[in-house]
Amino acid sequence: MGNSTPQQPLTLHIGHDELVVRRRYEVASILNDILVALWFIVGSVMFFSENWTTTGTWCFLIGSVELLIRPVIRLTRHVHIRRIRESPATAGGPAAATGAVADSVQDY
């Protein structure tokens, strides 16, 4: 109770290009998650019939591969944003100053 200084809100300065890139990768990740769910739902339904068991197994395999795609999307986003921050147009700008903080933000 000894310190009565009001705390200032944390302000992150992220460039317009970085926000656009983050949103695009977020949409790709969401679409990938929807596809994963659909593959597993369809595969599960197919297991109710012996005639569709093999096709259902393929749906599970495809869904499993899709699970690998999400971290690939996240890694690609990370590399893309790093390149934007290191480009000469943004060097020394506000986005470069807060790079470490913005990297720790998980937006999906």
Image: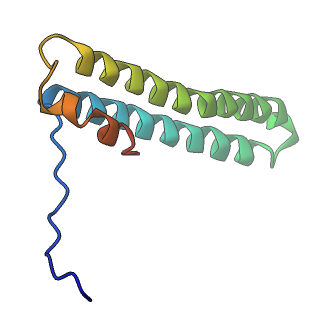
Query: In the rendered view, does 36 fall on the left or right side of 45?
Result: left
Q: Identify the image quadrant of the C terminus.
A: top left
Residue 24 position within the rendered picture, expressed as x and y whole percent measured from the top left: 29, 30
Q: Is residue 7 above or below residue 94?
A: below
- Residue depicted at x 16% and y 51%: 11
The answer to which of 54 and 49 lies nearer the viewer is 54
What percent of the width, then of the height, locates residue 69?
Answer: 56, 27
Where is residue 29? Give x, y as percent: 44, 36
Q: Residue at x 14, y 22 (%)?
A: 92
The answer to which image quadrant residue 52 occupies is top right
Would you place residue 12 above or below residue 91 in this image?
below
Q: Residue furthest front?
A: 2
At 23% from the left and 37% from the top, the residue drawn is 98
Q: Name the residue at the top extreme.
A: 88
- From the viewer's side, name the closer residue of 34 and 1: 1
What colouring does the structure picture have? Answer: rainbow
Q: Is residue 46 left or right of residue 89?
A: right
Considering every residue shown, the one lying at the far bottom of the view is 1
